[in-house]
């Protein structure tokens, strides 16, 4: 059993069960799951290191 930086204790089996439930639609409804798995364009970084408008 591994201990994380914030003292979260888990096993690979626990993580596999969680992701299977998450991506299998057992934790979120379809609209919420679609929102979490949809990528969006980010604004480019300007020469000053800030984000401009896309």
Image (cartoon, rainbow, N blue to C red):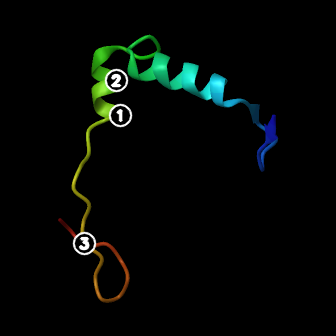
Q: How many marks?
A: 3
Residue 6 locus on image (x, y percent): 78, 45
Residue in front for this viewpoint, 48 or 17: 17
Question: Which badge, 3 or 1, is on the more N-terminal residue?
Answer: 1
Q: Residue at image x 31%, y 35%?
A: 37
Q: Which mark is residue 4?
A: none
Question: Which badge, 3 or 2, is on the more N-terminal residue?
Answer: 2
Q: Secondary structure at mark 3?
A: loop
Whole-number angstrom distance, CA of label 3 to CA of label 2:
27 Å
| Left or right: 52 as drawn, with respect to 27 | left
Q: Are marks 1 and 2 in contact (CB under 8 Å)?
A: yes
Q: Which residue is mark 2?
A: 32
Whole-number angstrom distance, CA of label 3 to CA of label 1:
22 Å
Report which quarter residue 8 is drawn in.
top right
Report which quarter residue 50 is drawn in.
bottom left
Q: Residue at image x 73%, y 30%?
A: 10
Q: Which mark is residue 44?
A: 3
Q: Which residue is mark 1?
A: 36
Badge 3: residue crowd in 10 Å (few <14, some 14–19, many ≥20): few
Q: Residue at image x 35%, y 14%?
A: 29
Residue in front for this viewpoint, 21 or 49: 21
Give the answer, above or below, for where 2 lies relative to 52. Answer: above
């Amino acid at each position: 059993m591994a201990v994380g930086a914030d003292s979260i204790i888990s096993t690979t089996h626990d993580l596999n069960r969680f992701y299977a439930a998450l991506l299998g639609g057992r934790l979120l409804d379809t609209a919420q799951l679609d929102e979490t798995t949809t990528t969006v364009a980010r604004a480019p970084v300007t020469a000053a290191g800030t984000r401009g408008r896309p």
